[in-house]
Image: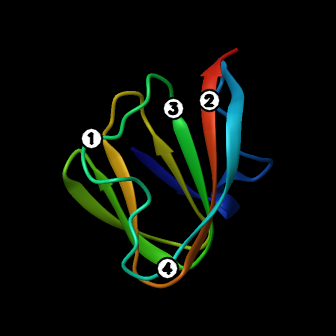
Amino acid sequence: MRRSTLAEMGAGVSLPGFRVESGGVSRLQPGEISHARGPHTHADPEVFLILSGAGKVHINGNISLFSGGDVLIVEPGEDHHLEAVSEVVTTWLHLEPA
């Protein structure tokens, strides 16, 4: 996983060689996890733009903290879950090769 912030991204979030395939907005309540328990992976990157709140991102069993303004880029094949500590609002983008 790569972590950055919207402020650090400047002109926008971009991953050369990929385009958005699908996406949406999700809201997680405190204690809620973004995906059902068990492995959750994708063949292409997924980007989470954390709009508000704070939580933990679980990547291949490792845990890191996130908060509003963070950009999380989940690499292909990484098992990932978001866990809300406070109410979290995020946009998620599934990418595909351009």
Instruction: Please say if 37 is above or below 47.
Output: below
Tell whether 96 sits left or right of 55: right
Quadrant of res 34: bottom left
Q: Which callout, 2 or 4, points at the residue further toward the start of the chain?
A: 4
Q: Which callout, 3 or 1, points at the residue further toward the start of the chain?
A: 1
Do labels 1 and 4 touch, CB within 8 Å?
no
Q: Which callout, 4 or 3, points at the residue further toward the start of the chain?
A: 4
Q: Which callout, 1 or 4, points at the residue further toward the start of the chain?
A: 4
Tell me which amino acid carries mark 2.
Leu
> Residue beneath label 4, please?
29
Q: Which callout, 2 or 1, points at the residue further toward the start of the chain?
A: 1
> Residue beneath label 3, please?
45
Viewer-proximal residue, 62 or 82? 82
The N terminus - image quarter: top left
> Residue beneath label 1, please?
39
| Residue located at (69% from left, 63% from top) | 7
Question: Of helix, strand and loop, which one carries label 3?
Answer: loop
Q: Residues within 10 Å of mark 1 (few under 14, many from 20)?
A: few
> Residue beneath label 2, please?
95
Q: CA distance from mark 1 to mark 4?
A: 21 Å
